[in-house]
Image (spheres, coloured by chain):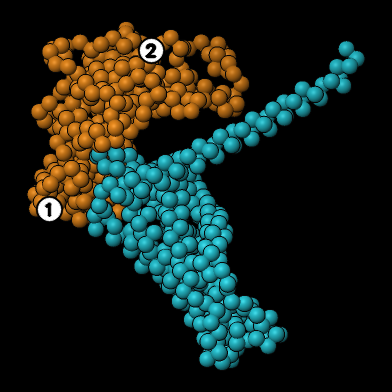
Amino acid sequence: MASSPAAAPQPALNGWLAGMVANLGGFAMSSVAGIGDVAIFTLQTFGWMFARRQRREVLLPSFYQIGVMSLPVVALTGLFIGMVLAVQSYAQFKALGLETRLGSVINLSLVRELGPVLAATMLAGRVGSAMAAELGTMRVTEQIDALESMGANPIYYLVVPRFLGCLVLIPSLTVMADFMGVLGGYLYSHVLLGIDYHHYWENSRAYVDAFDFLMGLFKSFFFGAAIALVSCHHGFHCSPGAEGVGRAATNAFVHSFVLILVLDLFLGIGLNNLHDFFRPEGPRKLL
Amino acid sequence: MPAAAPATSRATAAADPPVLRVAGLGVRFGSQQVLRDISLDLDAGQTLVVLGESGCGKTVLLKTMIGLVRPTAGDVAFEGRSLARMNDRQLAHLRTKYGFVFQGAALFDSNTIADNVAFPLREHTRLSEREIGEIVGSLVDEVGLPRSVLAKKPVQLSGGMRKRAGLARALALDPQLVLYDEPTTGLDPIMTDVINELILRVRERPRVTSVVVTHDMSTARKVADRIIMLYPLFRLRSDEPQIVFDGTPAELDRTRDPRVRQFIEGRAGNRLTELLEEQGLVARGADEAVDEEDPT
């Protein structure tokens, strides 16, 4: 009996360890189930996209909401990214006497990375959260059940138009963000920093080619698809009540944002390798 | 009386096969069992009212009847065809024979009332817009709505108008089975009776079968041919049936089952004490102590 007080912590430790392993297992199980759920949702979306043609009156409101209504905010985002890049790069380039190369670094950063990623981030907030909140409210107020009860498929009616809208219009908005960023960078560099416009554009032309622009555009298709699928999935699986709708909107943004960053990394690696494969001489050196 | 005794006085029942057969139905959400071993047959032209307190699984039962909730045990069959064995396309086609009136109407917020009522017609028929417009007009007339509401959005309508618009939408495809989920909840007594009258008118349509989920006794007494009462599973022993009453409205009034009497008379009994005990706000057994002190 004398040994029992010393032995007492062992069961407690075992219990704690067992609890931790059980929690870890539960987390792993729910993660796998969640990924499987999104995968099935994605397959259903693709299935319905090709199974039946969308009606114009269903498609147009989604396109209007996603594309037209996002135009001002995306243009403003692009404009400011370009100007901020000029502000941050100028001092470094001036110290080396390479101010005229500012155009190349601003435009290269813009079309390859910052334009597509920041436009997608802005749209994940504006479009993704709105879609999750709208579909979440429809779930909570039984409008999605009503669609099903009338023999209509909610994925065909609610997800496919939003998915197509994001797939087509987020790359288009990315082009807008790129254009406004290029314009903002130039205006700040030329008008406020006094950099010669001829050399600014000449250096831009020399270091930024079509591949850089297309690389950004290519990534934006994936960002658009990710925003639509993640946001619609959160809306469809919204918990009851105002809190559930709020959580769906927040999670839609957070998960879309994380997915955008992950996709950006892997697509960046893949596309750079592709670039090196087709052009083994490599990119021109900036400095 | 009478747990799960079949209702009497349904002469046609023996002749025709049931429109809807629920056999050994069980529904579980995670660890929570909501429905257990529910069996009932619904005859053509019958109006079944499902009574029960909040949380007893009435709406879940209604949604399993149309396949919106998949049962974890048992089966639901419409005209002899099992819903569980149908693929999505077959289930979608089957649902054109149903009309579902949701508790909050569930009208599409972004569409006008005209578009809401026209939705099933556009989805499942090849009618022209002019023909659809005529049908939509006659449907809103039938539920007593003015034609001026057709151009309005659901948020611009009162609760009673929304429910009637939901009923008009549910009737658009001339359904064989109409399911009502708490059709009178949240309405004033006059509008409640208007909805009851509308349910009766729908019942007059040839061979329309109805299931009305409600906890409103005035609705139950007015529209029902047959009433069943569900009881929450957590208040039952594992060997007790969940349908604690099955009979006609007259039989309901004569029943001596204390669980049914408590519901139809609207008595709280010791429910408040039980709820406070569950939350730990009152020590367990406090009500018994009070009962002992109170000779009445």
Q: Evaluate whether label 1 is on the same chain as label 2.
A: yes
Judged by depth in the image, the label closer to the viewer, 1 or 2, is 1
Identify the subunit bearing mark 1: B
- The quadrant of the rendering that contains the N terminus of chain B is top left
- Residue A151 drawn above or below residue B3: below
Residue sitting at x 32%, y 39%: A145
Residue sitting at x 32%, y 21%: B75
Q: Looking at the picture, which amino acid does disc 1 mark?
A: Glu
- Residue B113 drawn above or below residue A112: above
How far, Cα to Cα, is label 1 from label 2?
A: 50 Å
Mark 2, residue position: B241
Q: Looking at the picture, which amino acid does disc 2 mark?
A: Pro
Residue sitting at x 48%, y 28%: B30
Q: Nearer the viewer, residue A184 or B237?
A: A184
Identify the subunit bearing mark 2: B
Q: Residue furthest right?
A: A2
Mark 1, residue position: B129
Q: Tell me which chain appears cyan.
A: A
Residue sitting at x 53%, y 70%: A279
Q: Tell me which chain appears orange.
A: B
Q: Residue furthest top?
A: B1
Helix, strand, or loop for circle 1?
helix
Q: Position of residue A81 (x, y in %)?
A: 54, 74
Q: Nearer the viewer, residue B280 or A114?
A: A114
Q: Position of residue B194 (x, y in %)?
A: 20, 36
Classify mark 2: residues with Cα within 10 Å, few (<14), some (14-19) or many (20+): some
Residue A59 figure quarter: bottom left
